[in-house]
């Protein structure tokens, strides 16, 4: 909660104008600048997520969630060994780049929806716009990994990176392990930012935030696992 300096009434911590007297409680933010916001998320995520939540316009949220979808789809391709289903690297990359953006937006919509429900169980009221924007900006590490790590994976292994026959580990063990470790670091970083994002949205303690995050990620992964599993069993 945030107390109005003029009339002393308590307002929600993301309120810009006091509900009672109309005084400004914190600086109004009109627009989000892409590069300075990305930089600030890397430097001080808590404060930046707070600013994203109070900003009037949530610029670039859909673009960021769309781009990170390319990371999701290649992660799924890696899990299901999709490289074994085709001989053309070009078709494979084209499939990922075209399925990725809509998948990314759908995933962030679903994640935000589950986040809103699970925080509501704990008495918090997150608006959809705020949730969607904060979650989209939490995916910055995935966007960075698409720009810097995915091209190296494709150039080093081609389709074999997304295949177990032969295992990429047997082809180039050092490169494969290094790339997986890098991907793992970027994934952990994303989870950390998602955690910080929930904190900025709810201003609750770490137990509440961690419980919400575990519930949200479990429900979403369970949903995706079921869908992917049923699609693969139809192909086979
Ligand atoms: Zn007031």
Image: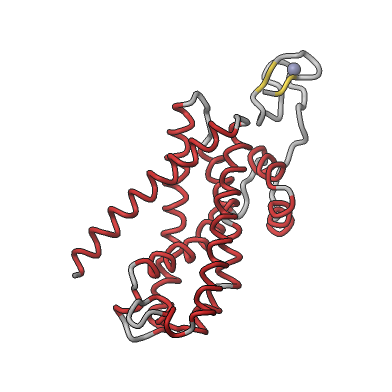
Query: Nearest the camera: 121 or 134?
Result: 121
Which residue sits at x=38%, y=51%?
Answer: 221
Which residue sits at x=24%, y=65%?
Answer: 232
Q: For the view shown, which residue lies furthest in the right direction?
A: 6
Q: What is the quadrant of the C terminus in the image?
A: bottom left
The image shows residue 196, relative to residue 136, as above or below, that is above
The image shows residue 16, relative to residue 166, as above or below, that is above
Quarter of the image for residue 159 reads: bottom left
| Ligand 1 image-quadrant field | top right
Which residue sits at x=57%, y=67%?
Answer: 182
- Horizontal side of residue 176 vs 20, given as left or right: left
Query: Nearest the camera: 94 or 79?
Result: 79
Query: How many numbered circles does the render carry?
Result: 0
Q: Position of residue 19 (x, y in %)?
A: 67, 20
Which residue sits at x=59%, y=51%?
Answer: 138
Quarter of the image for residue 86 reads: bottom left
Q: Position of residue 2 (x, y in %)?
A: 71, 23
Q: Where is residue 146 in the image (x, y as percent from the top left)?
A: 55, 69
Q: What is the quadrant of the N terminus in the image?
A: top right
- Horizontal side of residue 134 vs 13, given as left or right: left
Q: Where is residue 41 in the image (x, y as percent from the top left)?
A: 69, 51
Q: Colour mode? A: secondary structure
Quarter of the image for residue 134 reads: top right
- Horizontal side of residue 21 vs 211, given as left or right: right
Query: Nearest the camera: 229 or 55?
Result: 229
Query: Nearest the camera: 29 or 156?
Result: 156
């Amino acid at each position: 909660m945030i107390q109005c300096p003029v009339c002393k009434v308590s307002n929600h911590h993301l309120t810009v104008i006091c509900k009672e007297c109309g005084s400004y409680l914190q600086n109004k933010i009109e627009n989000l600048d892409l590069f300075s916001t990305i930089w600030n998320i890397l430097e001080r995520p808590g404060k930046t997520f707070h600013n994203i939540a109070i900003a009037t316009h949530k610029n670039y949220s859909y673009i960021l969630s769309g781009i990170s979808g390319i990371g999701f789809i290649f992660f799924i391709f890696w899990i299901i060994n999709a490289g074994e289903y085709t001989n053309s690297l070009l078709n494979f990359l084209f499939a990922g780049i075209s399925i990725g953006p809509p998948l990314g937006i759908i995933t962030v919509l679903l994640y935000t929806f589950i986040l809103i429900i699970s925080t509501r169980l704990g008495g918090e009221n997150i608006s959809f716009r705020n949730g969607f924007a904060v979650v989209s900006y939490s995916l910055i590490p995935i966007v960075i990994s698409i720009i810097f790590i995915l091209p190296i994976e494709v150039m080093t292994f081609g389709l074999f990176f997304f295949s177990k026959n032969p295992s990429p580990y047997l082809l180039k063990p050092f490169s494969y392990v290094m790339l997986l470790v890098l991907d793992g670091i970027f994934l952990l970083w994303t989870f950390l930012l998602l955690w910080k994002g929930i904190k900025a949205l709810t201003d609750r303690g770490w137990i509440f935030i961690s419980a919400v995050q575990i519930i949200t990620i479990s429900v979403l992964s369970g949903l995706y696992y079921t869908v992917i599993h049923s699609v693969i069993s139809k192909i086979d």
